[in-house]
Every structure is written in structure tokens, then in C-alpha cells.
Amino acid sequence: MAEQLSAQPRGSLAPKRLMLLVTIVQKGKGTFFSDYLQTFETNLQICVVGTGTARADLVEFLGLKDNKRSVIFSVVREDKLDAILSALEEHFDTVNRGTGIAFAIPFSSVIGKLSYGFLSNERRMAKGDE
């Protein structure tokens, strides 16, 4: 009996892993990209203004207007990440003249079933149903 109990996992694993997607675009394009990311069922996004640290001569050499950027932090499901990154790459080329950076960092845990349900867009879990 003790062997059976120790073989079972402690707590349940989330059905879909969550990632923090960081997207960096030109200042003024944050709202456009935030709205676009929302089509991929991202329930939580935070957009902030950032300033790059490159010297003015390097910014000019690279053909950038300035070093002001919009930084978007989005919580996305891992199973949608490849589609999101591919779509962002396409939009960086067409909308943002090839400028933009996107990368993802995995969440190690989320506290609370309702929090996870909201962040992962799992409606059944977000409503608190069992």
C-alpha cells in the first residue's frame, strides 16, 4: 500500500504549460502587436515603454529612428508558441520593417487553479468548475 501511494504524483500537473512571451517593437507599435497577440488567446498582456542602451551612432548606423521601444509581456500557452512566433516574425518583416524581437521564458509554476485557468484561457478551470 505504501508503494502505491509513493508512486502517485504529488499534486496535479497543468494540462498546458504557460510561457511568458516578451515582444520588443518600435514605440507606438505596442498597441498593434498587443491586439494581434490577443487573437492567439492571450488573456494577460502588459505593455511598457523601454529605452535601448545603444549609442546614438550605432542606432543611426542600424537605420533605427531612436532607441525608444514598446515592450509587451504576454502569457501564452506553450502549444501556441510556435504559431505565435512564426506570425510575429512575418509581421516584423511586413509591419515593422524587419525590426522586432520576441522570445519566451517558461513558467515554473502558477499558484491557484483559477489563476491558471484564466492565464491559459481554459474556460472550464477559470469558472471554478471541477
Image (cartoon, rainbow, N blue to C red):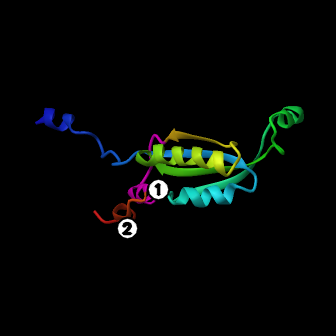
Q: Disc 2 marks which amino acid?
A: Lys
* Region rendered in magenta: 107-120
Splitting the image into 4 quarters, where does residue 1 fall? top left
Between residues 68 and 58, which one lies in front from this camera angle?
58
Residue 100 on image: x %, y %: 67, 43
Of all residues, the one furthest to the right in this rendering is: 57
Instruction: Pinpoint residue 88: horizontal percent, then vertical percent.
Output: 57, 47
Q: Mark 2 points at which residue?
A: 127
**Residue identified by numbered label 1:** 119
In three-dimensional space, the C-alpha distance between marks 2 and 1, rounded to whole angstroms, equals 12 Å
Query: Going by the picture, which residue comes out furthest to the left?
Result: 1
From the viewer's perspective, tell me whether residue 124 is left or right of residue 52.
left
Which mark, by number, is residue 85? Answer: none
Name the secondary structure under disc 2: loop
**Mark before the other along the chain sequence, 2 or 1:** 1
Residue sitting nearer the eye, 111 or 39: 39
On the image, the x and y values in percent for residue 35 come to 59, 61
